[in-house]
Image (spheres, grey):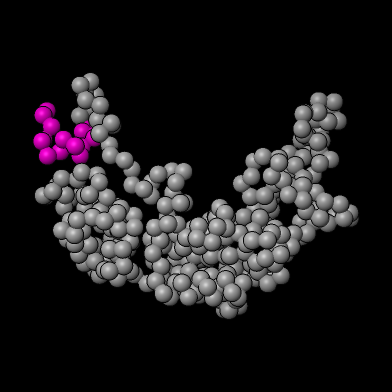
């Protein structure tokens, strides 16, 4: 079956079943959207973020008061991206990302103790089959800090901790965080029970090299500078008042048409106004009638400007897929 001329650059997979040895269609793919360049995503999402005055004010209030910033808004409104923008501009290193679900506990964020691995190594040692670098007496090898625990390590500069979608947690979780936020410290019982003031070296969050181990003294982690804590919520449920009282609250509103243009330009560069305007108007109309996220607009702009989506009826069919109402399900 001959390929339609206007689809020549767009259609990669034809559904015909048999490969065409004359054409290597996968090589026709254009470069991916910048937000899908793995290994560079955090950098891109940080430098392309476009805050408004209310967001700047809320972030600075949280920084000065050393309080968590609770960011609410619809899915896709940029709540998580705000944390990466703060970390990038203030040179605070990699964001400590802690995604929350209904099974998440406070301990998951503080530390993890692999008692089973330690018991296994102890049994091997007793059987004279001791493995290299597996000393059951070195309890630090079986401990690792979580994202919250790592954020509370003593440091001259704060880390950015992203607690993502706290409204998915169980009812007690927000209040469980309060003591840690107020005190800026926590205890690792497995170390405290040793009854010694000697330091034990353990791995921080997502570290893999033993050279990155940090010393914990007397089983206690105490921050010297409060981390920059960004907590996101889709407002699927209300959070307890004691928790809200200890946060700076920021509600992200839907971006205005002018701000949407700025966001598109930040991600894709300056585009032809004649191309941008009709798609932007289609997006705004769909947003007024249902629920659409800004990243859906970016996807549509990419397909039309970078992805060689052909004009005409076919383009409208594809854009309908991209602009699917998020609230229709």
Residue 107 visible here = no
Q: Residue at x 84, y 27 (%)?
A: 127
Q: Over which residues does the magenta segment extend? A: 1-15
**Quadrant placement of the C terminus:** bottom left
Q: Is residue 235 above or below residue 318?
A: below
293 within the magenta span:
no
Q: Main secondary structure of the magenta part?
A: loop
Q: Is residue 261 above or below residue 123?
A: below
Q: Residue at x 21, y 53 (%)?
A: 319
Residue 117 relative to residue 55: left or right: right
Q: Residue at x 25, y 53 (%)?
A: 301
Q: List x then y, in percent, for residue 25.
A: 24, 30
Q: List x then y, in percent, for residue 20.
A: 21, 23
Residue 143 relative to residue 45: left or right: right
Q: List x then y, in percent, for residue 167.
A: 51, 65
Q: List x then y, in percent, for residue 4.
A: 11, 35
Residue 121 visible here = yes
Number of callouts:
0
**Quadrant placement of the N terminus:** top left
- Snapshot quadrant of residue 117: top right
Q: Is residue 269 above or below residue 184?
A: above
Between 49 and 253, the one nearer to me in the picture: 49
Residue 254 relative to residue 128: left or right: left
């Amino acid at each position: 079956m001959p390929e339609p001329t206007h689809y020549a650059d767009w259609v990669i997979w034809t559904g015909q079943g048999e490969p065409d040895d004359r054409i290597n269609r996968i090589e026709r793919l254009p470069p991916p959207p910048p937000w899908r360049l793995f290994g560079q995503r955090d950098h891109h999402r940080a430098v392309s973020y476009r805050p408004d005055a209310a967001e700047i004010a809320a972030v600075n209030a949280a920084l000065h008061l050393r309080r968590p910033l609770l960011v609410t808004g619809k899915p896709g409104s940029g709540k998580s991206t705000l944390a990466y923008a703060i970390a990038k501009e203030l040179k605070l290193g990699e964001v400590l990302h802690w995604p929350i679900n209904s099974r998440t506990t406070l301990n998951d964020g503080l530390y993890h103790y692999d008692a089973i691995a330690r018991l296994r190594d102890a049994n091997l040692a007793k059987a004279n089959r001791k493995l290299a670098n597996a000393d059951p007496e070195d309890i630090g090898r079986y401990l690792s800090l979580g994202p919250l625990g790592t954020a509370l390590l003593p440091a001259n500069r704060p880390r950015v901790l992203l607690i993502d979608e706290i409204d998915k947690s169980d009812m007690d979780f927000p209040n469980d965080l309060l003591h840690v936020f107020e005190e800026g410290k926590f205890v690792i019982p497995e170390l405290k029970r040793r009854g010694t003031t000697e330091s034990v070296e353990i791995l921080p969050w997502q570290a893999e090299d033993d050279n990155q181990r940090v010393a914990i003294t007397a089983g206690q982690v105490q921050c010297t500078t409060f981390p920059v804590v960004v907590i996101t919520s889709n407002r699927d449920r209300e959070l307890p008042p004691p928790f809200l009282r200890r946060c700076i609250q920021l509600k992200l509103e839907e971006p205005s048409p002018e701000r949407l243009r700025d966001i598109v330009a930040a991600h894709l560069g300056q585009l032809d106004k004649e191309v941008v305007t009709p798609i932007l108007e289609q997006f705004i109309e769909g947003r007024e009638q249902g629920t659409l996220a800004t990243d859906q607009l970016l996807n549509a702009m990419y397909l039309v400007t970078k992805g060689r989506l052909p004009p005409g009826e076919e383009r409208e069919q594809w854009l309908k897929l991209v602009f699917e109402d998020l609230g229709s399900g």
